[in-house]
Amino acid sequence: MTDVALLSTVEQAGLIRRGEISSRELTEHFIERIERLDGEINSVITRDFATATAESDAADAAQQKGEPMGLLHGVPITVKDALQTKNLKSTGGATELQNNVPPNDAAVVASVRREGGIVMGKTNLPRWSGDIQAYNDIFGTTNNPWDISRGPGGSSGGAAAAVAMGFTSFEIGTDIGGSIRFPAAFNGVWGHKPSFGVIPTTGYLDHVNGGVNEADINVFGPITRSAQDLELLLEIMKRDSPPWVAELGSVPQNLNDLKVGAWLDDDFCPVDNEVREHLDKVVNELEKDGLSVDRAARPDLDPDEGAMLGLWLVQRATAQSTDSDGPGHRIWLDQHARREELRLKWAQFFSNYDAVIMPVCFVPPFEHQQEGDFRSRTLICNGEERGYIDVVKWTTMVGMAYLPSTVPPTGLGPSGLPIGCQVVGPYGGDKLTIALAGRIGDLMGGYQPPPRAL
């Protein structure tokens, strides 16, 4: 029998609703798994199990009285430590906030609580969410559940590792340069980077005085063990307060009617042979299943310009965490105007295609690197040394254009490590990218727990 901790959120919530398991029983089961298995992973770094069990008892009592139940009634979760959680230490991975206990929840955490979710603890990340790994001076290093010599991706690395290991029902991640997409791909779980603005991002701790403003490009989104969970959580988390209420596009009844592109490699950021061969396999399976995929489909833009402009804009959006004054506002406006031109080119592309399948990372999950920084580190790809900065090229050119991107689990490469792809769609096409990623996940075997989780 499948361990209940490894089921999807929809399945776990259904079990509670039908009285087949209590919230207290599920909460205690997650706690037992964290205490027994998280030592070598180090994903759940701040824990409030006493409050969680008390809230689960209250959820069970309310259910027995026949009181109304939310969609997540009694479901225990963890939350990335970059998000404010009421009365629970929230650090952003920075020593400056190591004793910070917010009086309020981030808006997205509040929305999950309103539906009955119970917060058990916080998950690890890099300082100010600023790396494709998950380590900091307060809580140390999070390891990849598939190979502890490697990182879990970042910045939502602790979040995705906790989902993969069955330490939480789901997670809430953040993504400004790939911080949901890398961890989802590296841990073999589902992740959705929403269209910019769809989910409110107040309560984000990316600098000492963070939490009030909503940074350019940055989004919050779910990390789960099923595509159905992504759909449910997107609906729960999305912005619903006037004057801006998110309206998302629909999905065709028959996904075989979609026009799909595949942009699997490119000279601007060549991918490792293991990644390329795995992505070819993904597209081959889609074609066998009846979808027509155009492997020559490309937007009419310079991808390197898009990637480097995206990186420039990300650096400006995160300047408060680096204490950098940066260029004047006029220069930002000029770069933003160029971004808008590239967004139009993406829109023109999506007038002919419904979605495009792309790499997340040019290499498989890589070994821990904690010396140096983005500019000085290197990675090996096809026997050649490449700059670490290439890691974010496939993700920033999507994120800077505000586009939705869904990462499904697609199985393991020859090295035995998860390799993911991103399904990118037009602005507001979140439901479509989740649906197509759902088809891919189904064809490739879906979520598979790492051996350490069993």
Image (cartoon, rainbow, N blue to C red):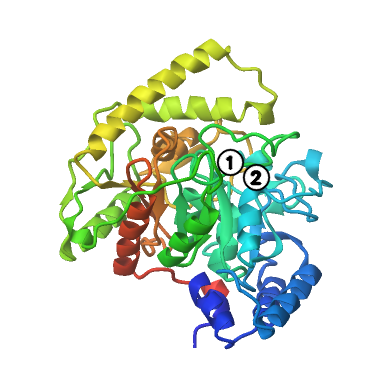
Q: Is residue 224 visible?
A: yes
Q: Give the answer, above or below, for where 57 lies relative to 156.
A: below
Q: CB atoms at circles 1 and 2 under 8 Å apart?
A: yes
State the image coordinates of residue 221 (x, y, percent, origin top left). 52, 51
**Which residue bears the numbered disc 2?**
126
Mark 2: amino acid: Pro
Residue beneath the point at 64% across and 74% down = 74
Q: Is residue 189 visible?
A: no
Percent of width and height locating residue 320: 67, 27
Label 2: element kind: loop
Is residue 431 shown above or below 100? below
Amino acid type at image mark 1? Asp
Distance from disc 1 to disc 2, alpha carbons, whole Å, reads 6 Å
Task: Identify the mark nearer the N-term, 1 or 2.
Answer: 2
Question: Going by the image, does 162 lie left or right of 442?
Answer: right
Q: Position of residue 273 (x, y in %)?
A: 31, 49
- The C terminus: image quadrant: bottom right
Q: Residues within 10 Å of mark 1 (few under 14, many from 20)?
A: many
Instruction: Name the residue that disc number 1 marks.
Output: 131
